[in-house]
Every structure is written in structure tokens, then in C-alpha cells.
Amino acid sequence: MLIRPSQVSLVGSFASYSILLSILSGPSPSSVHFTNSVKAISTLHSSLVTVLALIALRRGPWRTSSTPSTLSNDLKSSIAGGGGYADDTHNPLITARSEFANSITAIEAGYLVHDTIALLLAARLHKAGSKSLDKTLMTHHVGIGTALLVLHYYIARGSEVGIYVIVMFLLMNSSTPVLNLRWYLKTYHRDRRRILLAADLAFAGSFFMARVWMVWKILADYGRYHGWSALEAFMHGLRLPCKLGTGALWTANVGWWTMLVANMASRTTRFTLGGE
């Protein structure tokens, strides 16, 4: 079977990030130094994928086909109209293909596998052991990473669909550098309250745009092809698995953003009143 560029990108991503972590953390790192190295790689990766995703979305190259000849009959029927769903066989958001875009999703998949292992190693180094493991982040990595690895099974077979939409979802990475900056300030400069408040505001804004509004934007773009609003696209256009996944993702992101804003408002009030 012919090796595709995305397969090389997947393996190369995992290997490159693992080697970089080894270089940054050293042979016998402390828990703090290892965590700092993981955060640095996280910032590097999220910045890289954001830039690559923007290039792919704006410049391509994308190959569009109304009915991709390499799709299996099952996959063709899954995007064709039927069962009350919209016909997406002519929808470029669903049928567009790009080896460059495939490679970006591979870089993301390789990173998530690497970072999952890094999180487990960080927990081993921490004095609290497994209690220090960020279970929310671990769940995110396992869920998204597994989905991307399944995607690459289809890419290897030449039967991928929805790549353009998936690359749009990768723009969620754009809020991670601000998240890591906020973590750094809270960890090492807790006395710089004005800067911390500014970081909170920046993160709240970037999180909303990248992880709440972006989902709505994707639904709106999908719905526009069919003459629907974003809500109508969600209600009438998405297949059940996509509807469940998108709904759960958006609900979780809105919940996290709401808690973030509530905590930020509480800290702002304490700061204004002269508290810590």
C-alpha cells in the first residue's frame, strides 16, 4: 500500500515532539521542569497548527468532487440525501480534499498521542502521583486523539470526508497559547494582579472565539450551502453521531467558558475591593 504524506506527518509529529521534550526536560527532570517543558511544547504546537490551518483554509490547495470516486458505497450514501438528511454530495465543505490538510490533522493526532504520554509521565514525577493528573485534559486527548486516528484509517484508504470542517475545528488551538501564558503568570507571578486580570480577559475572549463561536461559525457555513441558519443546520443537517458530538462539544465549551467568566468576575471583584 502506498504511504501517504499524512502518515509520515503523523509518525514524524509524535517522534519530533517526543525528542523535543527529551531535549528540553533533560535526562533527570524535576516535576516542575518537566511540566514547564510540556507547556512550552503545547504552546509551540498550538501556534504551529493554528498557522497551518489558516493557510490551508485560505489558500488550499483543495480538490473538490461532487461524488469522490474513491469513496465506498457506504460513505457515498452517508453524505447523500436520505433518511431525512440533507444531500451533501455536492457540498465542498464535505467533499473537499487536501493532502496538506490531511497532514495537519496528522500533526495534531501525533501531538495528542505524545502529550497523553507526557501527562502520564508528569503525574509519575509529581509528588501527588496520579492525583495530580489532569483528568479533564486526559479525557480530551483520548477522545479527540482516538477520533483523529480513526480519521487517518479512512485517509489511508482514500475515503476521507469532511476534512475542511475538521481543519476549521483545529483553529480551536488558537486559544491554547493564551491559556499557557495565563498558567505561567498564575504559577510564577501571582503578585502581578493587573497582568493576571489582563491575561484572564485575553483568555476569556480567545476561548470564546476559538471554542464557542467557532462551532457556531462552522454550523453557519455548513447551513449556508443548504439555505439554513446555524441552528437549522444543527437540527436538520447533521447526522446523529455528528449532532451528538457537536452538541456535547459546544455545551462543554460553553460550560467551561461560563465558569471561567464567573471565576474571573469573582477575582476582579476581590481585586477592586483590595483583596488578594
Image (cartoon, helix red, strand yellow):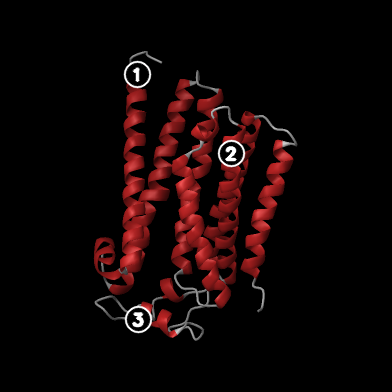
Give the numbered dot on residue 80: 3
Q: Which residue is mark 2?
A: 39
First of labels 1, 3 by sequence position: 3
Spatial CA distance of label 2 from label 1 is 29 Å
Badge 2 vs badge 1, beta-carbon distance below 8 Å: no
Q: Amino acid at mark 3?
A: Ala
Q: Quadrant of the N terminus?
A: bottom right
Q: Amino acid at mark 1?
A: Arg
The residue at the point 46 percent across, 73 percent down is 161
**Callout 3 secondary element:** loop
Which residue bears the numbered disc 1? 270
Q: Earlier in the sequence, mark 2 or mark 3?
A: 2
Q: Secondary structure at mark 2?
A: helix
> Toward the viewer: 242 or 127?
127
Whether the residues at callouts 2 and 3 have beta carbons within 8 Å, the answer is no
Residue 176 seen in render: yes
Q: CA distance from mark 1 to mark 3?
A: 56 Å
Q: Position of residue 9 (x, y in %)?
A: 65, 62
